[in-house]
Image (cartoon, rainbow, N blue to C red):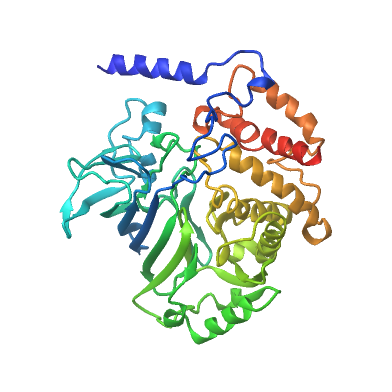
Amino acid sequence: MKLLQYVCLAVLCCSYFSTNAQYKPSKLFSDNFYNHKGDAIRSASGKPGNAYWQNRADYKVQATFDTETLKLDGSVQIDYTNNSPDELQQLWLQLDQNILNSNSRVKQLRQPGIATDTTKGYTISEVLILKNASWQPANYVIDGTRMQIRLGDEIIASGQKAQLKINYSYILQSKGGGGRSGYMDTKNGRVYEFSYWYPRMCVYDDYRGWNTLPFIGGGEMYLDYGNIDYSITVPAGELVVGSGTLVNKNDILSAKTLKRLEQAENSAKTVMIRKASELKQPVTTAKNGMVTWHFKMDNTRDVAWGMSKAFIWDAAKIELPSGNTALAQSAYPVEGTEQGRAWARSTEMLKGAVENFSNKWYEYPYATATGIGGSVGGMEFPGLAFNTYKAEPYLMFLLAAHEIGHSWFPMIVGSDERRYPFMDEGFNTFMDIYAHDDFNGGEFAPKRDGEYAPGKGNPADEIIPVIEAAKGGPTLLTPADAQKRELVHPMAYLHRPSDWYCCVKLS
């Protein structure tokens, strides 16, 4: 049986990776990328038609984090709305924390025969589904980073809603979630970053039905939109910042903190909400015990959050074209301001990027834009980014602009990062090129870095060796997880698509 599995795997890999040895520009966009001829759901151009639909996933998450054991205990209620014309006989969920579990696809591919270790990843203690007004045990199976709930006779008809409740836990690793979460120690305390921290629905769409690609690590997110209400209970003294709006700020923050936060909400200049000299003083009224931080974010694909006793916190007002405002905020350890590091300018740069993108492309729809300085090098979530605490001025602006730029692509646009990463990374880098030109009179222009012309020369010239290196290998349409790691950024993510978009704009 194992031999048969390996043979099948080899055949699949060969078919997945094989392509003509000669690079053919005409094959850049192959027929299997988009071949709709147009119908009531979407036109041949891709624009939504009068019968277009998206399913919806609303979440209410409650979690407690133990800083001694690093264990997060959570409960998530999911209200899933089937707006499709189809009857759904099963539901699929993403369990991306399971990437470190020995049963995950990536472990089986890279370390076949690895000893069983189920201590990493989710422990699912209960899965319930609402039937006849009462919670009943669900019939489910878990395969690596995916869960299937089998509905049996309880199909979900078009227009109907399903309600799930899942109780779970996991141990936060120093580096987890494909390098997108973790923790690090600083002189004033530990910094924690949480992503992929609750079970999330897979997308059911009109193009592929259920999108169930496993999480291998390179491919990122494809998620439904919905409202996410989440509460984090942690020891007093910790400062928590997360995607969306802090709903209970008046209940938990000290009077001094609230006053400074209000000043920041009305200031074009950065206001210090918690200074480096005040790290021994909690920002909450509670000095002992546990504190619950309650956040909400509407019409979003996901949320993430970070916390630390060591966080400096500053913020400023974002001014939007409509006259509305949002809040740019940064939380980072004092190490982010030492040795030439530029976290003291993070909020200024976030504000500049969001205002630039809002004026040029589409107005920012969220209440906050947040940068967190920690061990994660650079990772985007709706309205929030994890950026390395080591960032010096140029890298700080690169990360501040690029990672929050993902709030447009793919967070607002809604593209499938896991299958087509060039669609968000390429468009995002395209926006960044002009943001670099515009920020502070071109202080960090022209954009020349690992995302765009790493040799700091002519970007068009630097594409040539990338194309040569990729002969017989990946194309623009190759998913990140099917590429050699060294080709992911220049090929599928950044180099060629951003150059192509620039050519389109200039022509």
Location of residue 375 in the rendering, given as x and y in whole percent from the top left corner? 53, 53
Report the label total.
0
Judge whether residue 153 can be spotted in this image. yes
Extreme bottom residue here? 255
Q: Would residue 458 appear left or right of 399 to someone viewing this image? A: right
Q: Nearer the viewer, residue 89 or 475?
A: 89
Location of residue 158 in the rendering, given as x and y in whole percent from the top left corner? 32, 46
Location of residue 192 in the rendering, given as x and y in whole percent from the top left corner? 46, 59
Q: Quadrant of residue 148?
A: top left
Say which residue appears at 41% left-offset and 15% top-offset.
11
Judge whether residue 192 can be spotted in this image. no
Say which residue appears at 62% left-offset and 61% top-offset.
336
Considering the image in quadrants, where does the N terminus appear? Answer: top left
Q: Quadrant of residue 74?
A: bottom left
- As displayed, is residue 84 above or below residue 107? below
Considering the image in quadrants, where does the C terminus appear? Answer: top right
- As displayed, is residue 408 above or below residue 296? above
- As displayed, is residue 127 above or below residue 285? above
Q: Nearer the viewer, residue 60 or 177?
A: 60
Q: Would residue 63 appear left or right of 255 to someone viewing this image? A: left
Say which residue appears at 52% left-offset and 43% top-offset.
49
Q: Would residue 305 appear left or right of 103 to someone viewing this image? A: right
